[in-house]
Image (cartoon, rainbow, N blue to C red):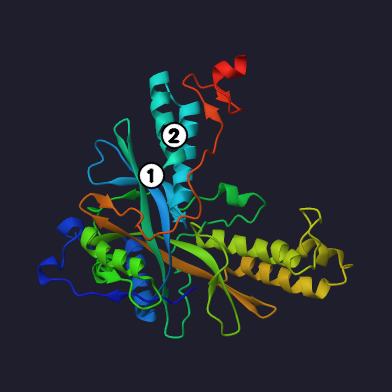
């Protein structure tokens, strides 16, 4: 993970203690035992990790309906590395809503009109049948100790009572940001309030960043002067020797999900990447099966991978080393800047990796799917 540090710009005294848009921050002291333990855990973690490393901006989609007040609801998880990826995800969500949920041709046409825009334009916000949909931007960062070590899961981070290591468990796991409501008025614990207030005036600095990126970062301090902290997420980070930690997976909702992903990588993916298992081997062949057979010429190497995966399963470990490469379960945070009109959208300097495009076949107002490019009259002739 790149160690990119932010610079904190002092804020005017009259703004200190205010929340988004100048609102007061409501602090609630935890009294329940679980909440109190989480607050103590956060205090200890803050004492151990004095620096922040920032990797990349992340993007998702949030919606706001009448009656939501200042709240927005995340409908596409804020985990994507490109604004156009989440526009495509919104495109797909609305297309399937038109296909499967629309109650009338008029409702379907409204949804398909939004899909058409998303197929042809870089749309960061649209209003559809009274609801607003916005592409939102967050920063991913990790706390680091004095030795450059990335924070690992905390004892009070959520874990399943009975870890599921079975095939297909990932499909049953919670998604990152599932059901997440962005509420700037929600009360904060003292540690959450301290983190929020200390970080809200951070901005990119340094020659590493192009001028437009620095300009947009400075502008965001004025247009979106505060931010919300999203729930912690987890990923695999890797390094060899004294090299910097680099990401080895996407974000996961729980530390167990990240451990299970790492166990799969150790027993299935890495042996194939290193040529220990042929790429065309049966899907159920992995390091464990070959070690059990004890006939493979590289059984000793495969046993190292299998042993590391077993230690992850039995000990809830957060770090293992295999053949000189260390793998760690990293705990990351995301902050989403907030302004008078809600969460920040992509900045002009954010990069799209591809252009808008049609993702699904044409759907007509009656819900019929057309798998060719011809108009209905042409198809019938």
Whether residue 85 sits left or right of residue 106 in the image: it is: right
How far across and down, in percent of the image, does residue 73 sit? 34, 45
Residue on which disc 1 sits: 123
Residue at the spot of label 2: 116
Say left or right for 312 vs 274.
left
Q: Indicate left or right for 79 with 47 as reference.
A: right
- Relative depth, front residue between 367 and 150: 367
Name the residue: 49% across, 48% down. 355
Res 197 → quadrant: bottom left
Residue 97 in the image: above or below residue 368 = below
Residue shown at 68% from the left, 67% from the top? 266
Q: Position of residue 175 (x, y in %)?
A: 49, 50
Quadrant where the C terminus sits is top right
Is residue 47 positioned above or below 101 on the image? Answer: below
Looking at this view, name the residue that lies furthest to the left.
14
Q: Secondary structure at mark 1?
A: loop
Tell me if I can see residue 23 in this picture: no
């Amino acid at each position: 993970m790149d160690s990119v540090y932010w610079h904190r710009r002092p804020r005017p005294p009259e703004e200190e203690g205010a929340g988004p848009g100048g609102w007061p921050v409501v602090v609630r002291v935890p009294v329940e035992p679980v909440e109190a333990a989480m607050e103590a855990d956060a205090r200890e973690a803050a004492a151990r990790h004095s620096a922040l490393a920032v990797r990349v901006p992340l993007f998702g989609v949030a919606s706001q309906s009448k009656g939501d007040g200042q709240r927005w609801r995340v409908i596409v998880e804020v985990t994507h590395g490109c604004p156009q990826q989440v526009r495509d995800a919104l495109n797909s969500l609305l297309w399937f809503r038109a296909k499967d949920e629309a109650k009338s041709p008029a409702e379907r046409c409204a949804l398909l009109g939004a899909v058409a825009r998303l197929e042809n334009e870089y749309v960061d916000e649209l209003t559809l049948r009274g609801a607003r949909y916005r592409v939102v931007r967050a920063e991913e960062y990790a706390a680091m100790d004095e030795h450059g070590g990335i924070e690992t899961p905390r004892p009070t981070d959520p874990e399943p009572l009975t870890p599921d290591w079975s095939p297909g468990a990932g499909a049953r796991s919670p998604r990152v940001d599932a059901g997440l409501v962005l509420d700037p008025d929600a009360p904060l614990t003292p540690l959450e309030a301290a983190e929020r207030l200390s970080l809200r005036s951070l901005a990119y600095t340094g020659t590493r960043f192009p001028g437009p990126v620095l300009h947009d970062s400075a502008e965001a301090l004025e247009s979106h002067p505060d931010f919300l902290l999203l729930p912690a997420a987890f990923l695999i980070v890797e390094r060899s020797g004294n090299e910097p930690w680099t990401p080895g997976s996407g974000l996961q909702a729980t530390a167990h999900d990240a451990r299970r992903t790492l166990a799969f990588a150790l027993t299935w993916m890495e042996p194939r990447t290193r040529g220990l298992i042929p790429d065309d081997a049966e899907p159920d062949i992995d390091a464990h099966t070959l070690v059990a057979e004890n006939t493979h010429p590289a059984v000793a190497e495969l046993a190292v991978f299998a042993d590391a995966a077993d230690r992850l399963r039995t000990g809830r470990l957060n770090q293992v080393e295999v053949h000189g490469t260390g793998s760690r379960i990293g705990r990351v945070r995301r902050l989403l800047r907030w302004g008078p009109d809600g969460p920040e959208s992509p900045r002009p300097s954010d990069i799209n990796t591809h252009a808008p495009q049609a993702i699904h076949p044409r759907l007509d107002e009656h819900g019929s799917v057309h798998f060719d490019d011809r108009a209905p009259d042409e198809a019938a002739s």
